[in-house]
Image (tube, rainbow, N blue to C red):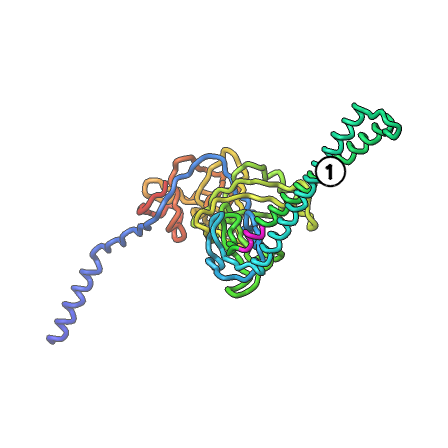
Amino acid sequence: MKKGLILSLLLVLLAACSNEPEEEAPERVTPVETAQVREGTFTVEREIIAKSEPAATSAVVPETPGEITFIGVEEGDRVERGDALAEVEPQQGDSQVELQENALAQARQQLDQAIGARDDAETALANAREQLDEPGDGFLSPTEQELEAQVSQAEQQLDQAEASVEQARLQVEQAEIQLEQAESQAAAATITSPRAGIVTSLQGNVGDMVTNQQPFATIVSIDPALITASITEDQLPLFEEGETYPVAMDALKNPNNSTLTYVSTVPGDTGLYRVEAEIDNPSDVIKPGMTATMLLPETVVENTMIVPTEALVENAGKTYVYKVEDDTAVETPVTIEASQSDESAVTGDLSAGENIVTSGQITLTDGAAITVIGEDG
């Protein structure tokens, strides 16, 4: 009896509960990030693959052959113009000095002899002219014609003597120069850098012999660095000497501007045209052989609506964005005119300054409630 009464009470309570109105589930609100639509000229950056090269390369050839006694740099070191790279002890330096000293002494002796011969020729000419001016009266005295011939011969001998003196002077000067060179080479010779740059190779160690016929080191200049590319004939109009072009590289945090210094007017063996640009490289972060990308801005669409590419949603062959209106996402169809990774040019029911969803739009539907948690622009 009691069990039946309890069961009846439970049924009454359940019936009462079932008659109470159900609570509505709260509306889902999606957090989103937005950006503004802007109007303007849409440009894309055409990418040209390039590489870095040294702006200049210098082979360092020792002036004096000999034995390396000291090396002050290593491969990869930066040097300035005139910096000492190594020192060389010349071969047979003392004997060369002695030979040149003997040659100079001989040249000076020949000069003294030539001067003496010239003095004798001057005396002979003076005597011949005196005899011509005061001819003798004796039967055996030379005739006037004979005296004139003697004067002419004396003049020729004087000319020859003066030429010999001049030649002897030149030989003395040459011997003096050769002696100075020998004395300079006899001293410990220092090999210096002809330009500022990076030491890329060293040919030899302390104790090795070097010659004045083969390079001891190679210095490359990489500030500014040289950016080179090979382009097609169709791409030639995009390049103009003196203009600046952004260059992107892994070694650079952001693209840096380069200045175009050369555009070939004649194609190479491959049919491509070489272009060169210089880019500042004060920290030497750009090394020869690195891959680079030259970025060439090119106008594609004028007076168009520009939106972040990440705002575009594609579904079932359609493309649209979500406009923000009164905390509601409004699906708005658009047509893409041009696009790149960060921005796209579109047409559709959009106006400059309107906010569109750039993050969180994947789960949205037309008319969905949203809350903006971040804005860009």
**Residue 30 placement, left or right of 38:** left
Nearer to me, 246 or 15:
246
SS of the residue at dot 1? Answer: helix
The image position of residue 169, as x and y in percent, is 66, 41
Nearer to me, 8 or 172:
172
The image position of residue 59, as x and y in percent, is 58, 53
**Residue 282 placement, left or right of 175:** left
**Residue 39 placement, left or right of 370:** right
The residue that disc 1 covers is: 161
Whether residue 304 is visible here, answered yes or no, is: yes
Q: Is residue 77 magenta?
A: no
Nearer to me, 212 or 246:
212
Q: Residue furthest front?
A: 138
The image position of residue 369, as x and y in percent, is 33, 47
Q: Residue furthest left?
A: 2
- In this rendering, the answer to whether 258 lies above or below 270 is above
Q: Which region shows up in magenta?
A: 181-186
Q: Give the residue displayed 20% in from the left and 62% down from the top.
A: 15
Q: Give the residue displayed 58% in from the left and 52% down from the top.
A: 182
- In this rendering, the answer to whether 96 lies above or below 368 is below
